Image (cartoon, grey):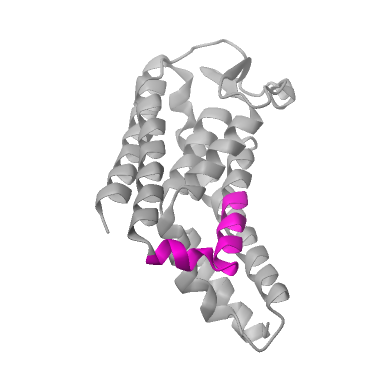
Amino acid sequence: MAFSLWLTLLAACVVISFTPGAGAINTMGNSLTHGFRRAIWGILGQQAALVVLIAIVAAGVGVLVASSPVLFAIIRYAGAAYLAYLGIRLILQRPVVVTEPASDPRADLAPEMAGAEETTATTAGPGVVMESRWSMFRRGLWVNLLNPKAIVFFLAFLPQFIRPGEPLLSQYVAVAVTVVAVDIAVMWGFFALAAQGFRRFTRTARGQRVIDRVFGALFLAVAVLLAFLH
């Protein structure tokens, strides 16, 4: 890939990553609830989904999804239902107030509950029950993966930076690495960091309820947009 073309790709990726969406909401919610460092697990799940979507488009499956109204609708409504589930779960979630200090260095050493959605009993700070890393990763994966419009977007986006006369594998790898690197930098370095300014609200039961309801409402709003806007 020519350097000038890669610079164009880089600029496009930065603009796209800064566009608010379900991934940004998920990242900010993780950062608020579990802290800046642990938010990376949800971000990595979102990146795994982006790699899968790029592979789907590269394999030509994206054309099938884009050209099949039924398949597109199935994935679209499944994605909307999942986001709605996340939103309702946040809104109904009961706050848990604990007394461990927020700076406890043992927080990141909490045992994992492999394959489970439940949280562990270890705390990440005042008022926070720590979710397992695998649960955060899996949630991030599904948030980005159950979005057929992302497939269609990549279907329109990727061909602009792929030259058929050159080796395709190396080009798709370059695109995937750039997309993932930029998205991690923006999600972790901007959205997760920005959320830390509001983390003081998670130290009280009332603050937790407000944060949970705000982010729950945002997930529901994105779900409605995904389900009803074409």
**Residue 229, horizontal then vertical, whole percent:** 26, 55
- Does the magenta segment cover residue 55? yes
Which of 16/199 is in front?
Answer: 16
> Which image quarter: residue 10?
bottom right
- Does the magenta segment cover residue 212? no
Which of 205/57 is in front?
Answer: 57
Residue at x-position 36% and y-position 38%:
81
Q: Indicate the quadrant containing the C terminus: top left, top right, bottom left or bottom right.
A: bottom left
Residue 185 seen in the figure: no
**Residue 69, horizontal then vertical, whole percent:** 33, 59
Residue at x-position 40% and y-position 58%:
149
Residue at x-position 42% and y-position 55%:
148
Which of 115/107 is in front?
Answer: 115
Q: Which residues are magenta?
A: 47-67
Residue 169 seen in the figure: yes
> Which image quarter: residue 117?
top right
**Residue 152, horizontal then vertical, whole percent:** 43, 64
**Residue 96, horizontal then vertical, whole percent:** 48, 13
> Which image quarter: residue 89?
top left
Outermost residue toward the left in this view: 228
Look at the magenta stretch and give its main secondary structure. Answer: helix
Q: Is residue 137 left or right of residue 173?
A: left
Q: Indicate the quadrant containing the N terminus: top left, top right, bottom left or bottom right.
A: bottom right
Which of 87/66 is in front?
Answer: 66
Total count of labels: 0
**As drawn, 201 above or below 97:** below
